[in-house]
Image (cartoon, grey):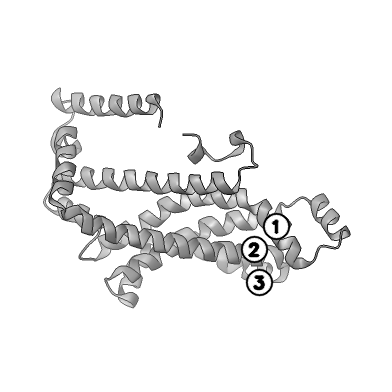
Amino acid sequence: MSIYHIAIFLTVLLAWKLTVETQLMDSFFIGDPVLVFGKIVNWFASGDVFRHLWVTLVETLVAFGIGSVLGLVVGLWLALSPLASQLSSPYIKGFNAMPRVILAPIFSVWFGLGMTSKIALGITLVFFVVFFNVYQGVREVSPVVLANAKMLGASKRQLLRSVYIPSAMSWVFSSLHTAVGMAFVGAVIGEYMGSAAGMGYLILQAESVFDINGVFAGVIILTFFAIALDYGVGFVERKLLHWQPREARTIGDTA
């Protein structure tokens, strides 16, 4: 994070505070940044937030991991199997077009109000983000590179390991930056629908008593942890794609 990022952040906080102090907007609706950050400090000082944060992070990481692996495997399979791709195409497009948020109450009935229903919802959100990027990345492998590899006697396994997967890696990591946020969305929405713990539950409790400062506090905490996970993805990307020019990497790595 550069000095410019910090300056922008402080400017936004100052504008927020001035808006409240000059009564351009009532703090009942937009909160007060001093009270919001005071609530964050109190939550961490009392330790109450750690249990909720742990639940949401576990749900997010498990959904992110499973959804990403499934998206990678299915994307590779359908990209390399024209028949399977043709047969499954209408079903995949139909399911992707479905607003998957409506699956939250269904998963709550199927899997209960525990972590499993939130993880299932997160997987459905992450899967398609990764799947379509992997599918497109494999389909756009250079025909010249493929022809040269086949001419040199490369087997299907060698093509997969040395041509298809490296070609799709940029697409994969581009999708993972988005998938992290989608995994958080799945966890929090699932907690909204019914749970006894998690940041979504904590935000819902604040919302039920019109505590707008508590709502903003929960949102800010979630945002910072989502950014931290995104930086984690960026770190892995830099290690695996060290050969790639920096300007060609995703926006998540420019900081």
Task: Tell me the CA gap for discs 2 and 3.
Answer: 15 Å
In terms of depth relative to the viewer, which is nearer, 67 or 149?
149
Residue 164's disc is 1
Please give the residue where the numbered disc 2 appears in the rendered image: 76
Name the amino acid, label 1.
Answer: Tyr
Ranked by sequence position, the earlier of labels 2 and 3 is 2
Mark 2 secondary-structure assignment: helix
Ranked by sequence position, the earlier of labels 1 and 3 is 3
Residue at x-position 84% and y-position 55% = 147
Mark 1 secondary-structure assignment: helix
Task: Tell me the CA gap for discs 2 and 1.
Answer: 8 Å
In terms of depth relative to the viewer, which is nearer, 49 or 77?
49
- Which numbered disc, 2 or 3, marks the residue closer to the eye? 2
Mark 3 secondary-structure assignment: helix
Residue at x-position 30% and y-position 58% = 56
- Residue 23 percent location from the top left of the image: 14, 26
Please give the residue where the numbered disc 3 appears in the rendered image: 87
| Rendered position, 136 above or below 216 | below
| Rendered position, 224 above or below 108 | above
Ranked by sequence position, the earlier of labels 2 and 1 is 2
In terms of depth relative to the viewer, which is nearer, 125 or 28?
125
